[in-house]
Amino acid sequence: MGDSAYSFSLTTFSRTGKLLQIEYALNAVSNGRCSLGIAAKDGVVIATDKKVSSTLIDVDEVQKIQSISPTSGFVYSGLGPDYRVLTRSARKNSAAYERTYGEAQPITQTVKQTASLMQEYTQSGGVRPFGCSVLAAGFDEDGEPKLFQVDPSGAYFGWRATAIGKGFVNAKSFLEKRVTSEILLEDAVHTCLLTLRESFEGEINGKNIEVGVLEKGGGFRILKEEEVNDYLNEAN
Amino acid sequence: MGDSAYSFSLTTFSRTGKLLQIEYALNAVSNGRCSLGIAAKDGVVIATDKKVSSTLIDVDEVQKIQSISPTSGFVYSGLGPDYRVLTRSARKNSAAYERTYGEAQPITQTVKQTASLMQEYTQSGGVRPFGCSVLAAGFDEDGEPKLFQVDPSGAYFGWRATAIGKGFVNAKSFLEKRVTSEILLEDAVHTCLLTLRESFEGEINGKNIEVGVLEKGGGFRILKEEEVNDYLNEAN
Amino acid sequence: MGDSAYSFSLTTFSRTGKLLQIEYALNAVSNGRCSLGIAAKDGVVIATDKKVSSTLIDVDEVQKIQSISPTSGFVYSGLGPDYRVLTRSARKNSAAYERTYGEAQPITQTVKQTASLMQEYTQSGGVRPFGCSVLAAGFDEDGEPKLFQVDPSGAYFGWRATAIGKGFVNAKSFLEKRVTSEILLEDAVHTCLLTLRESFEGEINGKNIEVGVLEKGGGFRILKEEEVNDYLNEAN
Amino acid sequence: MGDSAYSFSLTTFSRTGKLLQIEYALNAVSNGRCSLGIAAKDGVVIATDKKVSSTLIDVDEVQKIQSISPTSGFVYSGLGPDYRVLTRSARKNSAAYERTYGEAQPITQTVKQTASLMQEYTQSGGVRPFGCSVLAAGFDEDGEPKLFQVDPSGAYFGWRATAIGKGFVNAKSFLEKRVTSEILLEDAVHTCLLTLRESFEGEINGKNIEVGVLEKGGGFRILKEEEVNDYLNEAN
Amino acid sequence: MGDSAYSFSLTTFSRTGKLLQIEYALNAVSNGRCSLGIAAKDGVVIATDKKVSSTLIDVDEVQKIQSISPTSGFVYSGLGPDYRVLTRSARKNSAAYERTYGEAQPITQTVKQTASLMQEYTQSGGVRPFGCSVLAAGFDEDGEPKLFQVDPSGAYFGWRATAIGKGFVNAKSFLEKRVTSEILLEDAVHTCLLTLRESFEGEINGKNIEVGVLEKGGGFRILKEEEVNDYLNEAN
Amino acid sequence: MGDSAYSFSLTTFSRTGKLLQIEYALNAVSNGRCSLGIAAKDGVVIATDKKVSSTLIDVDEVQKIQSISPTSGFVYSGLGPDYRVLTRSARKNSAAYERTYGEAQPITQTVKQTASLMQEYTQSGGVRPFGCSVLAAGFDEDGEPKLFQVDPSGAYFGWRATAIGKGFVNAKSFLEKRVTSEILLEDAVHTCLLTLRESFEGEINGKNIEVGVLEKGGGFRILKEEEVNDYLNEAN
Amino acid sequence: MGDSAYSFSLTTFSRTGKLLQIEYALNAVSNGRCSLGIAAKDGVVIATDKKVSSTLIDVDEVQKIQSISPTSGFVYSGLGPDYRVLTRSARKNSAAYERTYGEAQPITQTVKQTASLMQEYTQSGGVRPFGCSVLAAGFDEDGEPKLFQVDPSGAYFGWRATAIGKGFVNAKSFLEKRVTSEILLEDAVHTCLLTLRESFEGEINGKNIEVGVLEKGGGFRILKEEEVNDYLNEAN
C-alpha cells in the first residue's frame, strides 16, 4: 500500500472538500530545497539552497533563480522541470506585455498570469497540478519592490518575507523575528543568508547558494559567486 | 480510507439523487474564511475576514473583494484561485455588455452568467466544480441595490443578508435577528462588522477585514483601511 | 458504502435493463420542492412551492416559473441550475421558430426540443442526465391549452393535471379526485392552490408559492403576489 | 451487488462472446409495453399497448406509432426517448431519399439505415446502445407490404407477424397459431387486437391502444379512436 | 462473476500474449449459425444455415449471403449487424477500385481491405473488435476462383474448403475427407449441402439454407430456393 | 485470475521499470511460428515456418514473407494482422524515399521507420503495442546485405543470424554454432533450412516453409516451392 | 501482485508528493547498460557499454552514441526506442537553430529543448514518461565543452563527470576519486575506459564499448573500433 494507494488522476474534491492532488503537490514542494525572499523598502532579495547531490555536478550550470524580465525574477522549491514550464510562460507573457504597452509588466500581472496557469492545471481534465511553488520578485504598478509566493493551487500572496521548501516552517519563524517593515535591502540580503545558513547542512558559500537582488529603480540580477562570498565574509 | 475513498472524477448522481462532487465543493466553501453581505434600502455592503496565516504576509496585496464593474463587486469563501477564474469571466462579460448596450450590466445578468459557468462545470466531462461560493453586490434593472449568493452547483438566490464560509450558520442567525427590510447602508455596514467580529479570532481591524460598499446612485468601492477603522471606532 | 457506492460516470444499462443514472436523477427531482399544473378547458395553470430555507432570502428574486415565449411557461422540481440550462435552450429555440415561421412555436414543439436535449445527456459520453423534471404550459398547433411533463430520461407526456417533486404521489392522487376534463381555469387555479396547501409546511401565501397562468387566446403570465393572495382569500 | 455490479461503459465482449450492454438493452425492451404487427397480403398493421400509468395523462398526446413517410410507420417497445432519436433520423433519411430519387424510400432502405445507426452505438466509444426495439411497416422495392423488427444490436428481420415488449413470448406463440401467409389486412387487424387483448390488464379500447395501418397501394395512417373501437365492437 | 468479470474495454495483451477481446469475439462467431465454402477448380460455392428462430420470420427477407461486386460474395457467422458494416465497406471499396482501374477488384484486394478494417478495430482506442468471421468468394488476379476466411483479429487465409460458426470443427473434418484439389463446382455444391445437412437440426431445404455460387468466367449469384431444392432432390 | 488479471490499457511503467504490455506482446511473438534469417557475405536469407493448422488451407495464398521494395523483404513471428500494418507502412515509406531520392531506400532507413512506428504504439494514449517481431533483409547505404530484427518495443538490432517465434532460443544457439562471418549465401540458405527442420513438427518442404533471398547486387525474391524442395533434396 | 499492482496511467502525485511513474521510469534507466561521460578542460568524452546479448548481433550496427549536430552528441541508458524519439527531436531542433541563427546551437539549448519534451510527457494526459536518461556533450554559448545529464522527469544538470544505468553508483564514486576540474581530454578518455572496465562483465574492447569525443574547437565524433582498442592497449 502506502504510495500505491493512488488518488485518481483528475484533481477532484475529497469528502472534506480538499483537492488531494494539490495537497500532494505541496508535499513535492516541501521535499525540495529551501528558497526564501524578503521585500525590503528599497528592493527585494530572493535566495535558495542549490546544494547538489554530488561534487561532480557542474554548479556553474545550476541556476535556480531565473530572471523573467530585466526587472523581475523567480525562484522555486519542488520539481525543477515543472518550474521551467512556468518561467518559460512568464517570460513570454512579460515580453508580450512590454511590446504591447511599451513598459515593464508589473510583477502583480506576472504573478497573476503564472497563478492562472497553475489553477488551470487543477481544474482541467487529464493533467496534474504543478509540483512547485514560486517566489517572484519585481516592481508593482507604482514601482514599489514586491515579493510574491505562488503555490500549486494557483493561490498567491504578497509577503514581506517568506520561505518555501524543506524547513520552511523554521525559516519563516526565523524571518518573522528579524524582518521589520523598515528593513533595507542590504540588511535583507544578510538576513536571507543567515536564515539559509540556519538550516543548511554544511557550510554555505557562493557555490551552493544562489541570491537574486532587485534594487528599487534598478534591475534584477543574480549575484556572482564572489559577491555572495563577500556578503558571507562581511557577516563573520 | 478516509480521504482516499475518492468519488469518481465526473460529477455523477449518487443513488439518493445527490451530486457528491458538489456537496464536497460546498465543504471547501465552508472551510474558507467567512464572508457576508447585507442589501440595505440605499445600498449594499459586502465584507470578509481576510486574516492571514502569517504576520509576514503583505496584507496590502490581499484583496478578496473584487470590483467587477464600476457599479458591482464580488467577494467569496473557499478556493481563491477558483474565484479568480470567476471574476475574470464576470469582468469580461460585464464589459462586453456595457460596450454592446451602452449601459452598466444589471447585477442579475452578471450573476446569471457566473452561475451558468459554475453549472457547466458540474455537467461537463473531465472537470470538477468550482470550490467557492460568491457574494455579488450590484444594481438590478431598476437601479435597486441587490445582494446575490452563487454556489458551486450554479444555484443563486437574492438575499437581504447572508453569510458563507466558516461559521456561516451562526453568522446568518445573527444577521436574521438584526437585519430588517428597512435597514440603511450605514447601519448595514455596522451590522456586518458586528457579525464578523462575533466569530473573529482576535481583534478585527482595517487590516484583517475587507469591506466593499455600493451606494444607491453611486459606484462600488472597497473601503480604505482607515475607513474600516473609523467604522469600528464609531461602534465602540 | 451508501453514497460512496457510485455507479460509473456514463449512463449505461444495468443487468435489468435500467439506466441507473436516470433513476438517480429522478431521485434528485423527488428531493425538490413540489410543482404541479392543470390543463383546463380554457387555459393552463402551473404552480410551485417556492418556500425558501431562510427568511433572509429576497423572495422577490426567487422565480421558479419562467416564461419561455409570450404564450408558454415552464416550472420545475429538482436542481435549479440544470433547469436554467433548459429554459435558456427552450427560449432560444422558441424565438428562432417565431422568427422563421412568423408565429408562436406550438408547445408540443418546445417540449420535444427540450426532451431531445435531455435524452442526449443520457446517451452521450462523459455527461450526466439533467437533475430536474419540467412542467410546460402552452398552446398546441390548434391553439388548445396543454400541459406537459418532461423527465430526466427525455420522456414526456401530456397531462390533464400532474405533480412533480416532494410529495408528488399524494398530490397526484389529490388531483385525480378533483380534476375533470371539464374543469375551467378559475377552478383549476383554486385546485392547484388547494393541492399545494395540502402538503405545504406552514401557511401558503403569495410570497412562498408561485403561480403561472395561460388563458386560452391570451398570453402566459406569472401572478403577482397580491393576485395569489386574492385567490387564497377567496378560497377561505 | 445486484444492479450496482455494473458492466463497464463500453460495449465489450464477455468471455462467452456476448455483448452484455446489448443484452441489458434488450431487457429494457422487454420491460416496455407490448407492440406487435402483422404483414398481410394486402397491407400491414402495427399496434401497441399505450395504457398509461395515470388517468390524468392526456392520452390524446400519447402517440407511440409514428409515420416516417406517407407510406411507412414505426412503433416501439422500450425507452421512448431513445425511440424518438430513431424516428427523427429515419424521417430525415426518408425525406432525403425522396428528394433525391423522386420516389418513396423502400422500407428495406429505411430499416437498414435505422439498423446501422443502432449498430454504431454498439461499437463506438463512450456511448450506450439504444434501449428500444422498433417495428417498421412499409412497402419494399416491389410495392409489397412488409413488416420489420429492428433490435438494439442493429439486427433486423422481416416478419409475417411479430411482437416485442412485455409478454412478447406469449404474443408471438398466439400469432403463430393465427397468422397464415394468406391473411388479409382486415383479418390481420382483428388478430392484432385479439393478441393485444390477451395480455392486456383491463379492457382495451381506442384510448389505451394504438393501431397503424398500411394498405397496399395506399398510405400509412394511424386509426382514430372510433375506428379502433369499431374494430373492437365488430369482434364482440 | 462469470460474465461480470469483464476484461477491460481496450483490446490489450494478457500476460500470456493473448488479445482476449479477440478471443471472446471468436466465441461470438462460434455461437453463430454455421457457414461454409469450397473453392473448386471451376468456381466457388459458399453456403450457410439461415434457419430462423420463429416460423413467423419472413425468410425471403433473410439474406446472409451478400454479393460485394458482380463477381464476388460474402457470407458470415456471428453478429449480423457487425457483418453489415463490413459488406458496406467492401462494396464501396470494390466499386471504387473498378471505377479507378476499369476492371473488377481481385478478391485478394477485397479481402485485404476487409481484414485491415477488422485489424484496426483491435488496435484503436475505445472500440471493440468485430463479432463475426467472413467467408469471401471471388477471383484472384489471374481469374482463378478463390475462397477466403477473415477472422475478427484481421487474420485471413485462402482455403480450399472451410467452415465457421456452430459446429465448424465437425464440418471442417467432414470437408477434409471429401474435398480434393480436383473437385468441380457441381460436386462442391453437393458437398456443401451434405456438410450442412450433417449438423442441421431438422430437414434442410431451399428456405432454411442459402447458397451462393461463382462460376469461373461468370458472375456471383445466390441460388433461388428452387435451385437449392433441385440440388437437394438430386442428392437423394 | 490468470488471464483475467489484466494490466491497464495504457503501456505504463511497473514498479521495476518494465513496460508490461510490451513484455506481453513479446509473448505473442513467442507464441507465433518460428522465423529466422542469416546475413551472409554475399546476401541475406530469411525463412519461416508457415505450416498451417489445416490441410484445407490454400497454402499458395499463405505468404508470410513480403517484399517491401525490389531489394528488401520482411518476415515476422506473432500476429499476422499487426504485421500487415507494418509492411503497408514500410512499403509506402520505401516508395516515397525512392521517388524523392531516385534510389532504393537503405534497409537501415526502412528499419528505423518501422521501429519508430512500433515505439509510438508503446507511448501514445489508448493503443496497444504491435504483437509481432519483424526480420528485415536489405542493403545498407554501402550496398552491403544486412539483416535486422525489430521488436514490439521498437528496439532493433542488426544480426548476422537470428530467430524469432516458437523455439527461437534453440534456433539461435543452433545458428550460433553454424554461422560464421564468412558464410556465403548458398550455405546460409542450407543452414536456415537445417535450423528450421530441427524444431519442425513433421517433414519440411516447399509447401510448409517459405524462404526469401537477397543476393548482393541483385533483388529480393521469394523462392518457389520447387526451389525450396531442390535445396532440401540437395541437403539429403 | 508484484508487478501487477500497477499505478494508474497518468503521472499523478502520490501522497508523499512523488510522481511514481517517473520513479519507475528511473528504474528502467538503472536496468539499462552503463553510460558515462567526463567534461574535460579541452573537450568532452562520453562512453557506453554496448555489450550485446548474443554473439550473433552485428555489433557494427549497434550505435548507442548519436551525433546531434556536427559539434554535439548524445548517449543514453534505458529504453533505446524512447531514446531515438529524443535524438530525432534534438536533431531537428538543432538543425532549425542553425538555419535560423547561422551558428551551431549551444548544447545548453539542445538540452533544454530535450528536457522540456521529457517534462511534457510527465504532465500531459494519456502518455507515459520517457524510459531513458540522456548524456549530452557539446559546447556552451562561450564555446566551452560541457556535459549534461537529462532524466525522465525532465530534470537536467551540468556535470564534470557522471554515469547512468547499471552500476552508476559505483561508477560515479570511481569518477569522483579520479576526475579533477583540471583534467584533460586524453586523460578523461582513459578514465572513462577505466571506469567502464571496472564494472564490465568480461573484457572490454572496441567492439563492446562505444566512445564519443568532442575536442574544444573541433567537432563531435565517435571513435572507431581501432581507436578504442589503441586507447585500451595504451592503458595496459
Image: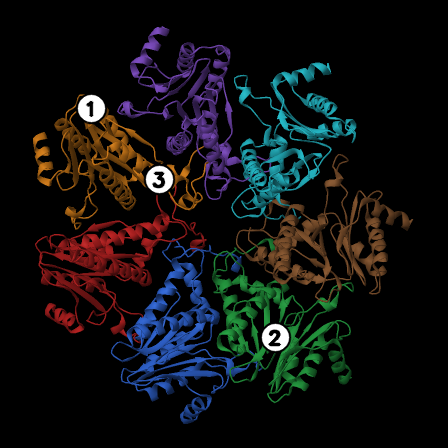
Chain colours: A purple, B cyan, C brown, D green, E blue, F red, G orange
- Residue for badge 3: G25
Q: Nearer the viewer, mark 2 or mark 1?
A: 2
Category of crowding for the residue at label 1, using alpha-carbon neighbours closer than 10 angstroms: few (below 14), some (14–19), many (at least 20): many
For residue G179, the mark is 1
Mark 3 belongs to which subunit?
Answer: G
Residue at the image position 10 percent from the left and 33 percent from the top: G231
Report the chain holding disc 2: D
* Residue sitting nearer the eye, D38 or E185: D38
- Please tell me if label 2 and label 3 are on a single chain: no
> In the image, residue F21 lies at what x, y percent?
37, 50
Mark 2 vs mark 1, CA separation in Å: 88 Å
Q: Disc 2 or disc 3, which is closer to the eye? A: 2
Q: Amino acid at mark 3?
A: Ala
From this viewpoint, is residue B58 visible?
yes
The count of marks equals: 3
Residue at image position (74%, 80%) is D227
> Relative to D235, is F143 above or below?
above
Residue where numbered disc 2 is placed = D73
The relative height of residue B125 versus residue B208 in the rendered view (above or below) is below
Residue neighbourhood size for the residue with mark 3, other residues' Cα within 10 Å, grouped as few (<14), some (14–19), many (≥20): many
Q: Give the residue type at disc 1.
A: Val
Mark 1 vs mark 3: tell me if same chain. yes
Is E128 or B219 nearer to us in this picture?
Answer: B219
Could you tell me the amino acid type at mark 2? Gly
Classify residue G132 as left or right of residue F98: right
**Of F173 and D87, the residue lying toward us:** D87
On the image, the x and y values in percent for residue B86 come to: 56, 37
Q: Secondary structure at mark 1?
A: loop
Q: Position of residue B193 (x, y in %)?
A: 69, 22
Q: CA distance from mark 2 to mark 3?
A: 61 Å
